[in-house]
Image (cartoon, helix red, strand yellow):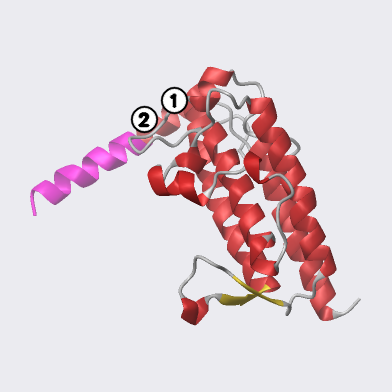
Amino acid sequence: MSRNDAMKTILKRSLQASRNDLLWKLEGLSERDLRLPQTPTGFNLLGAVKHMANVEVGYFGETFGRSWPHPEELVSPDQIATDPQADWYATSAESAEHINGLYRRVWTFADETIDRLDLEAQGTVPHWPEERATVTLQQIMVHVIVDLTRHLGQVDIVREGIDGQVGLNPKISNIPDEVDWDAYLASLRALAEDSGSRSDTT
């Protein structure tokens, strides 16, 4: 295996792991909880999946001269022009099952691009400034992984706030066992209060 093939394998594995984790974080919640805005700017769990479906189609599709076969399933530029947040929430006609299914089909579409091209293969991102619009597949894979993992971190925190579910993935929690979380939180609050008191006197 060449060095580039090895790197592509690593990037593709990282991308897929984060995709899987994103959908796992939504499991077991009601349609209401999945759609309910959780921040002052409206961040919601199902919207994060819809956003990433549109992101991956764009970066692994049009960037490399491929078109999604069902454009009516995506948020169009005209919709974005009238509603800049159109890809960040599910409409009343879009169920969680539909959005999750769409994202899974997008994976197949995106992976076809990844598998067909070398990491050095060039494409053009239509909505980026001209001076940096020419990109390689490797750049785009890294860009999408960064975008996805950033939103996955947001989803982690929102899910914990809804029902207390935490964990890295279904197999590895990455959370220490036998912690007295009430005592731990109390100690953090005490540290914050102490820091605040000291800063007020300086």
Disc 2 to disc 1, how far (Cα)? 6 Å
Q: Which of the pair 25/78 is nearer the observer?
A: 78
Q: Secondary structure at mark 2?
A: helix
Q: Which residue is mark 2?
A: 186
Q: Which amino acid type is marked by label 1?
A: Asp
Q: Which of the pair 145/55 is nearer the observer?
A: 55
Q: Which amino acid type is marked by label 2?
A: Ala
**Residue at 61% from the left image edge and 38% from the top image edge:** 175
**Residue at 59% from the left image edge and 33% from the top image edge:** 166
Image spot of residue 193 (x, y percent): 23, 38
Residue 186 lies, with reference to residue 13, above or below; the image says: above
Residue 21 lies, with reference to residue 2, above or below; the image says: above
Image spot of residue 181 (x, y percent): 48, 28
Q: Main secondary structure of the magenta part?
A: helix
Q: Are marks 2 and 1 in contact (CB under 8 Å)?
A: yes
**Residue at 76% from the left image edge and 43% from the top image edge:** 105
Check the image and name the residue furthest to the left.
Answer: 201
124 left or right of 2?
Answer: left
89 left or right of 135?
Answer: left
User: What segment carries the magenta color?
Assistant: 188-202
Residue 144 position by quadrant: bottom right
Say whether residue 168 is visible: no
Q: Which residue is mark 1?
A: 182
